[in-house]
Image (tube, grey):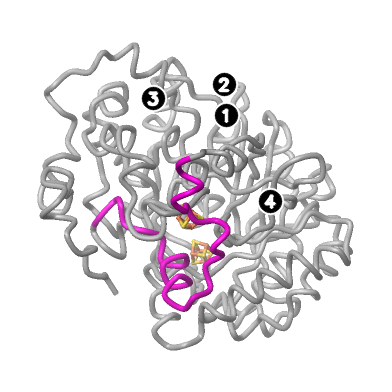
């Protein structure tokens, strides 16, 4: 549930409090920025297209909670002409790649045309799917795009567990077929598992299954307390912070040593060994790309990301009426983020040595919980309250003054990890 805004924030920060004004601010501002300079400084690297309002599964942990689209019903999907027009407008702003997600992106009635346009426009493709609709023909089309990266969700190593989480009978076998279709055309897809009480004992089995199918990596996601995931947290089915911290250590120290595959987990950077993320043997880390990303919802709205489905405050306009350049360069929420990240972050994120890279993990998630864009990430805040946040990752007076340790953390080259959560 939404938390109280940290004490003193409104009083001390004055105009910085976004809660009251955010609906107004999210419209393109009449105050013009120096557009060219803004676009150069903040290129629009990637667009996340939430192509469909519906989904053919009904997962217990879904952070967006799309409508269930079974046989015989359908829900809005992004208009193809609008999709093309957004791409055409975004390329001069710096667009190099798109992510297709949902709902379930492969439910889009013109998914073939969408993939073809991405290929024609020479854009990198990232696609998050539950795998059920991934036919050999669609896999071929994905493979024809530039640097394609596809992730498939498997929440259990057997049908019973996977389908308990995903809510639709038969979806395990279909997802497995989808993975095979991808592997057959040369992909080494990423398998994503959202870990909860019901499936946590199958994590190693998922790695073995992924290996046997020819996947390239496995990522373990923390269930976010958003939309349906919020209910899982309330019911106790989501793991508590002690369990999550322990599980992260086990993945880094034990599970990842038992396989040649890359194993990732979505724990915040402060909880990961530096050697695992940076340097020669580092496998990278998830870096918040919020300053170079824009979301497009299935109805054609621009939004911070898919969370706009459940948080209308973070919707910035509509592709049919608002020029993308205007939205990208002049939307007040985006300007505030560019000015304020990471120094305006609150709570544990304000004290964290990783904040320059991590940027508070997920602004949309933080806003959903608190109605403040500067709120700390729930995982780290909760860990600090329980005495579980690693002290070595926090600013201390001496460190700030002499700057040495801070520099040490900032210096490593960041390797971006592609990952997702369909
Ligand atoms: S405290 Fe905030 S900035 Fe630091 S790792 Fe956690 S989410 Fe990221
Ligand atoms: S997690 Fe993905 S597959 Fe499951 S309901 Fe949500 S959008 Fe659909």
Residue at (65% x, 44% y) in the render: 417
The part of the image, by quadrant, that contains residue 414 is top right
Q: CA distance from mark 2 to mark 4?
A: 37 Å
Per the image, label 2 sits on a secondary structure element best described as loop
User: Closer to the camera: disc 1 or disc 4?
Assistant: 4
Q: Is residue 253 magenta?
A: no
Per the image, label 3 sits on a secondary structure element best described as helix
The residue under label 4 is: 274
The residue under label 2 is: 121
Q: Earlier in the sequence, mark 1 or mark 4?
A: 1
Q: Earlier in the sequence, mark 1 or mark 3?
A: 3
Q: Earlier in the sequence, mark 4 or mark 3?
A: 3
Q: Quadrant of the C terminus?
A: bottom right
Q: Which span of residues is magenta-colored? A: 372-401
Characterize the local packing of mark 4: few (<14), some (14-19) or many (20 or more) Cα atoms within 10 angstroms: some
Q: CA distance from mark 2 to mark 3?
A: 12 Å
Residue 43 percent location from the top left of the image = 44, 23
Characterize the local packing of mark 3: few (<14), some (14-19) or many (20 or more) Cα atoms within 10 angstroms: some
Q: CA distance from mark 2 to mark 1?
A: 5 Å
Residue 199 percent location from the top left of the image = 65, 81
The residue under label 1 is: 118
The residue under label 3 is: 85
Residue 371 percent location from the top left of the image = 23, 59
């Amino acid at each position: 549930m939404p938390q109280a805004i940290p004490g003193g924030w409104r009083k001390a920060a004055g105009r910085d409090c976004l809660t009251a004004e955010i609906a107004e601010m999210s419209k393109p501002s009449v105050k013009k920025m120096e557009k060219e300079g803004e676009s150069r400084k903040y290129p629009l690297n990637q667009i996340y297209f939430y192509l469909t309002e519906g989904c053919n599964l009904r997962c217990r942990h879904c952070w967006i909670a799309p409508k269930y689209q079974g046989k015989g019903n359908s829900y809005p999907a992004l208009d193809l002409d609008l999709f093309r027009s957004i791409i055409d407008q975004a390329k001069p702003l710096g667009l190099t790649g798109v992510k297709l997600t949902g709902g379930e992106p492969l439910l889009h009635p013109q998914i073939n045309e969408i993939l073809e346009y991405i290929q024609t426009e020479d854009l990198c493709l990232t696609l998050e799917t539950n795998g059920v609709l991934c036919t050999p023909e669609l896999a071929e089309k994905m493979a024809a795009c530039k640097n394609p990266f596809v992730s498939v969700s498997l929440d259990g190593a057997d049908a019973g567990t996977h389908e308990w989480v995903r809510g639709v009978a038969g979806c395990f076998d279909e997802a497995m077929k989808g993975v095979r279709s991808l592997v057959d055309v040369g992909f080494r897809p990423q398998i994503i598992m959202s870990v909860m009480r019901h499936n946590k004992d199958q994590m190693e089995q998922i790695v073995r299954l992924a290996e046997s199918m020819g996947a390239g990596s496995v990522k373990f996601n923390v269930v976010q307390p958003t939309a349906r995931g919020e209910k899982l947290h309330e019911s106790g089915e989501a793991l508590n912070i002690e369990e999550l911290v322990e599980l992260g250590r086990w993945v880094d120290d034990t599970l990842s040593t038992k396989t040649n595959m890359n194993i990732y987990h979505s724990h915040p950077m402060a909880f990961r060994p530096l050697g695992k993320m940076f340097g020669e043997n580092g496998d990278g880390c998830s870096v918040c790309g919020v300053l170079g990303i824009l979301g497009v919802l299935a109805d054609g709205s621009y939004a911070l990301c898919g969370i706009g489905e459940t948080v209308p405050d973070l919707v910035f306009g509509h592709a049919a009426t608002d020029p993308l350049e205007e939205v990208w360069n002049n939307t007040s929420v985006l300007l505030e983020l560019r000015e304020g990240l990471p120094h305006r972050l609150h709570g544990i994120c304000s004290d964290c040595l990783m904040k320059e890279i991590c940027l508070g993990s997920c602004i949309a998630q933080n806003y959903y919980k608190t109605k403040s864009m500067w709120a700390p990430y729930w995982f780290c805040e909760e860990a600090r309250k329980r005495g579980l946040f690693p002290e070595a990752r926090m600013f201390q007076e001496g460190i700030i003054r002499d700057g040495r340790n801070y520099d040490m953390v900032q210096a490593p080259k960041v390797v971006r990890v592609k990952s997702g959560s369909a």
